[in-house]
Amino acid sequence: MAHIISGEAKSLLKLGLADDGWPWDWTTLGSIGIHQDPQKKVRAQIIAKAPGIWAGAGIVSAVQNLGSELAAEAGFSSNSFSVKSLVKDGTAVKPGQRVCEWYGPASLILGLERPFLNLASYSSGIATATHELVVQVKKACPKKTPRVTATRKTLPGYRNLAVYGLQMGGGIPHRISLSGGVLIKENHIAAAGSITEAIEGCRAVSPHGLKIEIEVKSIDEMEEALAAHAEVIMLDNFSVEEVRKAIMLLEKKFSKSAPHARPLIEVSGGLNASNIGRYAMIGVDILSVGALTHSVKALDLSLLIDQ
């Protein structure tokens, strides 16, 4: 997937340069530009300043591609800009560890520094947070470990980058877009009139290969969803005790008569590092965490030019 991210990351890097007004970077123009040596080349390195999981290979490829193009436009040779990765995606990094090296025109490196760091810090931050949750979930439920996934709570244009970070941290994507799955939520139910009507309506129009998933807020709603043959049931904002009760009801209903017909169970709503281990239990198939994309802490990275 890194090659797919590379294409999107290149567009995001261009957007970052445009946002920064890069051609009129007075600081760089004054430091090494008009009155100094505009052809000056330097070496630099990206350093991890905190422990985490690296998820920047696609962005490294993108900055290599874009940097070479910009260098050529500025009159440099085609090989005057290069970026080298030093660690593989999904690898744990330590504070002070070098993750990649840059070489090229100083003005170009200084221009691309912030857009690159913003993107790499974001995807690596998601990878880091995901890895922490996956470790907790595996420890809490080693026999049949639930999947850890995120949600669609991403900024426009950044979804694939976020999903890639999730994967590098050991998570599994949820639906990537609205067309990637059927997920009936409370507003769909309200608009349709009932859980049953919403499920039947979606089943009538959706591709046959997609599972019908529905969000429920109580055991009573879960039982209605079961009667309508929902294939995935999301227990939204259930307490740990309520989740256990829901699983017990499912086991009683499906364990002997038709275990193959048992729906997948997803738990969502307020999951985080402090409580996800309590929800990781046999019977829960998916743990979805919106915070992995909508409020993740970026991995602290820094670019330093060699003296």
Image (tube, rainbow, N blue to C red):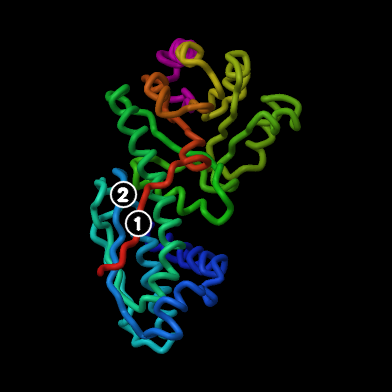
Magenta segment: 245-266
The image quadrant where one finds the C terminus is bottom left
- Please give the name of the residue rendered at 42% of the width and 28% of the height, measured from the top-left corner: 285
Q: Residues within 10 Å of mark 2 (few under 14, many from 20)?
A: some
Report the front residue among 205 and 297. 297
Disc 2 marks a residue whose amino acid type is Lys
> Which label number is shown at residue 276?
none
* Residue 101 horizontal side relative to residue 206, left or right: left
Residue plotted at (54% across, 46% down): 154
Of callouts 2 and 1, which one flags the residue occurring earlier in the amino acid sequence? Answer: 2
Residue 290 relative to residue 278: left or right = right
Q: Is residue 261 magenta?
A: yes
Q: Disc 1 marks which amino acid?
A: Ser
Please name the residue that numbered disc 2 is placed on.
49
Percent from the top left, x then y, of residue 181?
A: 55, 42
Q: Residue at x 32, y 50 (%)?
A: 54
Q: Where 156 falls versus 192 (above or below)?
A: below
Residue 228: image quadrant is: top right
Label 1 neighbour load within 10 Å: few <14, some 14-19, many 20+: some
Closest to the observer, 227 or 146: 146
- Residue 302 got which mark? 1
Eyeballing the image, is 228 above or below 80?
above
